[in-house]
Amino acid sequence: MAYFDVFNGDADGLCSLQQLRLAEPLESELVTGVKRDIALLKKVSAGKDDTVTVLDISLDKNRADLERLLDRGSRIYYFDHHFAGRIPDHQNLTAFIDPTPDQGTSLLADRYVGGRFRLWAIVGTFGDNFDYSARKAGEHLNLSEEEFNRLKELGILLNYNAYGATLDDLYFHPGELFSLMQPFENPLIFVEQADTFQILREGYQNDMSRAEELSPLILTEKYGVYVLPLAPWARRVSGVYANL
């Protein structure tokens, strides 16, 4: 029997898996990718009686491979907040899918583990830009404003790490990043003790500084056109910079 953990490489996917594996530790094969690589089940070769846990990737976009794995006899646990379409009625599929607005997969995982690692759920929710829901989830935890801000920054940085055209563009492979997070039940301690946080922070700041040095090709009152170089930092920063 083999175990596979399949997760979006962004903050929501990472923090969802973090909660599950803190609650239910096991050795698994990690299957992940950059933020926009969501057709991940095609990379899974599970068979009869293997267990596949899927986090934060659309069921609708992975339907054919989900059905392939179910036909092989794999057991699937599926956690996601995106549009799913028709959810297969199969005895080997357990679906925790809720597309309710303003919540990510981290809050579904939080519900599953009974809120035991709520701080990681808050990090993932901040990372998915659901700020109100993140603060709502932490309203009874007696967190200071400084602690909320640290959790938010960590969520932003974990999310930013997943931007890129390929895994080579990222500061950390999401599988490696998960392994670095795994020993920490409390993300605030992770921020204080792990070098990872500072590497992500400095990388984000350096990328944004480079972007701010760009001169517009076209600039009007309504829009600006910028040409970014063919470089890893530009592929990382493009999505974030476009939203500023």
Image (tube, grey):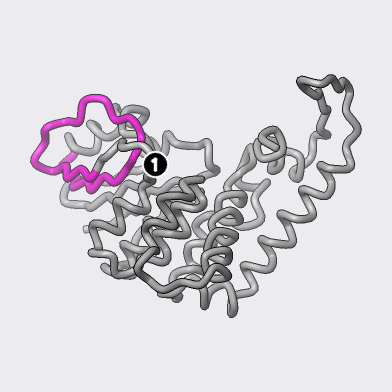
**Figure quadrant of residue 43:** top left
Disc 1 is placed on an element classified as: loop
Q: Is residue 226 above or below residue 43?
A: above
Q: Residue at x 72, y 38 (%)?
A: 241
Left or right of 155? Residue 171 is: right
Q: Is residue 91 above or below residue 14?
A: above
Farthest left residue in view: 91
Screen quadrant of the N terminus: bottom left
Q: Position of residue 196 (x, y in %)?
A: 62, 68
Q: Residue at x 23, y 64 (%)?
A: 114
Front residue of 178/219: it is: 219
Q: Position of residue 219 (x, y in %)?
A: 86, 22
Q: Position of residue 184 (x, y in %)?
A: 45, 75
Left or right of 200? Residue 94 is: left
Q: The magenta stretch spans which residues?
A: 72-96
Is 94 magenta? The answer is yes
Residue type (three-letter) at the residue carrying disc 1: Asp
- What residue did someone put label 1 on? 102
Is 237 magenta? The answer is no
**In this view of the protein, can residue 186 be seen by the observer?**
yes
Q: Is residue 17 above or below residue 55?
A: below
What is the count of numbered marks?
1
Left or right of 16? Residue 218 is: right
How many residues crowd around disc 1 within 10 Å: few (fewer than 14), some, or many (20 or more)?
some
Left or right of 236? Residue 192 is: left
Front residue of 184/115: it is: 115
